[in-house]
Structures are given as structure tokens and as C-alpha cells.
Image (cartoon, rainbow, N blue to C red):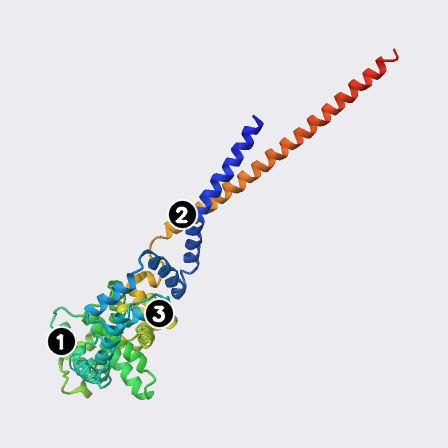
Amino acid sequence: MKWLRISTALTGIAACSFMLAQVAPHAREAGAILAAQDDPAALSELKLDAVLRQNDRLVQDNIEAALAAGDADLADSFVALARDRNIALPDDLLARVSDAVKDENSTSHFARRFATGLVTGNADDVASLSGTVAGDLFVIGDVRDVVREGKHLAMGEDTDRLVLGLAAAGLAVTAATYVSIGGAAPVRAGLTLVKDARKVGRLGEGLAAWAGRSAREVVDTPVLQNAVASGSVLRPGQTVSAIKAAFRAEKAGALVRLGKDVTRVAEKTGTRGAMDSLRIAEGPKDVARAARLAEAQGSKTRAIMKLLGRGALLLVGGVFDLALWLFGAALTLFGLLSSIKATTERLTQAWCDRRRARRLRRAQVAAEAALASAAGPA
């Protein structure tokens, strides 16, 4: 019975050790992810490790897809990621990416996209954004957007209040840019990017809802309706003065911070990287996280966001599963320690019982010898 109890305890040690060996790697990874949930750069690195382990060709396939879609910037971002991760890529693929990047950065392409951004006010790359920002700095773009959306509002038609608010805020920031000799230009560019993302449908639903509420707060609707009733793109000076009167600067702090964060992303990843972050963001905090990620990862940021989506910015779902791995590891470790304790106690008890039995036998032998020696003379 005694050895059965010892064998049971030893079996518990073996079983718990095996289970802990299986659970420990997952628990270690879960613990690292939970610890890094407030650091987008560290979190994205950990998640990339898991994603890239599952598919060796993931980076190469994404480069091919980006080239097929005409997005040389994204393809180049994946090349930077492969270089950082020591992932080998075919030479012909690298040559195709290089040629595509050169073509995208050519003078003719830049001029064409600049003109498109200046005229239409829509941007999806550096060149078109330069044209859009140029138009907004000369108040043409913002006046156009405010007059158009303001007249929709005055007529009771469907109005994009977000574009309206961003354009009104942009006019005020443009004035500050001139006063500060360009000091507010980063905010100006960031607001333009948010406005363009809204126009082309690349603004995340949650972020769009938040920005819409913020935009409503910065615009005095009755004053704006009076301003745009007589406003015109052909009279930008008078129109801007009237619109600025409807702008509540004290309510624009949140939009200004958003513009700064978007500009931080664009400085490190380019216009398309900023657009990607706006597409996956559900609020201004996500954009701030994207800015931190971009500052840490640089040109690799677009590739990371393409692979991980919003999961590159924060811990999205799976918290229960991660906690379950940690709980399972803790429970298994407790079982192992309990089995070791039980085995130690039972072995110690067996050793003590054996010594006690040995002493009893010696005492019995000594007593019998004493009785025999005493019986001899008698």
C-alpha cells in the first residue's frame, strides 16, 4: 500500500511535467503579449513572430499582391520587413519592387498626381497629398468643401458634417500656419489627410463617428448657414472671414491632436501609411498608438498593419484565451509542486518507517540475546 502511494505521486510528477512542457511556451507567449498590450511596437513584434511562423511565404505572397494592385509603396514596406526579419526573397522579385518604386517616384508621375490632388482635393499618395495640402493652404480646398457642404446644410440636404467641420477647422489652422510661419503646417496636413480619408471612404467607422461628433462641436451651424448663403469660391477672402466667425476654436483641441498624430504617422510611413492607420482606427487613441508604432517601425509599418490589422495597435479579442493559457500553466505548476511535495513526504515517511522497523528489529535481537545469556547460567 505504501509503495502504491509513492508510485501514484511519481506518476503525478511525470504527468504534470509533461503537461507543463506543452503549456509553458503558450503561457510564456500569452504573458508577453499581455505585458506588451500598452506598447504597440512590442505587441506587433510578438504578433508578427506568431504570424510568420505559420506561413513561410506570407511576406512574398503579399509583395506579389501589392505589385499586382499597383501599390509599390506597400510592396517596398514588405521588403523592409523581410530584410529586418532575415527572410530571403527572390532577386527577380526585389528587382520588380525596385522598378515599381522608381516609376512611382518619377517626376511625371509626381506632377500628374500633384495636379489631381490640387484640383479634386483627394489624396492617396505623397504627390496627390502635396497638391491637396497646397490647395488647402491657399484656402481653395477648404472653402470649396465648406461652401458645398454648408449649402447642403442650408438646403436641408444630406450633409457630411465631418468634412464640413474638418474644412472649417482647416481654415482656422491655415490662418495660424501663416501667422506662425509654418508652425501649424503639420496639423494642417493631418486634418487634410483625415478629410481626404473621409472622402474616399477610408476612415474607420468608429473614428468617423468620433470625428463627426467633434466636428459638430467646432461649428456654429446658424452662423455658418448665414456665411455660406452668400459665400463663394470666387470670393475666398470674404467667404473665409465669414466662415471663421462660425468656427469655435476652443472646441477644436481634440481635432488638432488628431491632426498632429496623423502627421506623425505620415512622416514615418508616407501618405498611404497614414490612410491605412485611419482605416483601421476606431478612435483617436488608436491613431495615437499608430503614431507610436510608426515611430518605432518606420517603413515596415504598412506591412505590419496589413498583416495584423487593428491588432498591430492594441490587443483585440483573445484576452480570455491568453488568460486561460496563463491559468492553465499556473494550475499545472501547482499540480507539479503538489506532486513533488506528496512524493517527498511519502518517501520521507517510508524512510522513517524503515529506520524505525530496523531499530525495533535490533532491539528485539538484543532483547533475545539478553534473555538467552541470562537463561544460560540458570
Near-viewer residue (270 or 286):
270
Between disc 2 and disc 3, whose residue precedes? 3
Residue 245 visible:
no
Which residue: 21% across, 70% down? 67
State how far apart marks 1 and 2 are (Cα).
Answer: 56 Å
Say whether residue 352 is left or right of residue 148: right
Q: Is residue 125 above or below residue 1?
A: below
Q: Which residue is mark 2?
A: 324
Q: Where, by quadrant of the figure, is residue 49 drawn?
A: bottom left
Between disc 1 and disc 3, whose residue precedes? 3
Q: Which residue is mark 1?
A: 151
Quick check: marks 2 and 3 in contact, CB under 8 Å?
no
Query: What is the crowding at mark 2: few (fewer than 14 residues within 10 Å), some, or many (at least 20)?
Result: some
Q: Quadrant of the N terminus?
A: top right
Q: Secondary structure at mark 2?
A: helix
State how far apart marks 2 and 3 are (Cα).
Answer: 35 Å
Between disc 1 and disc 2, whose residue precedes? 1
User: Label 2 sits on what residue type?
Assistant: Leu
Give x and y (percent) for residue 200. Answer: 18, 70
Say whether residue 178 is left or right of residue 140: right
Q: Is residue 9 above or below residue 225?
A: above
Say whether residue 15 is left or right of residue 242: right
Give x and y (percent) for residue 158. Answer: 13, 68
User: Label 3 sits on what residue type?
Assistant: Arg
Near-viewer residue (21 or 187):
21
Say whether residue 277 is left or right of residue 150: right
Which of the labelled discs sits on residue 83, or is there none?
Answer: 3
Q: How many numbered marks are there?
A: 3
Near-viewer residue (264 or 336):
336
Near-viewer residue (240 or 360):
360
Q: Nearer the viewer, mark 2 or mark 3?
A: 3
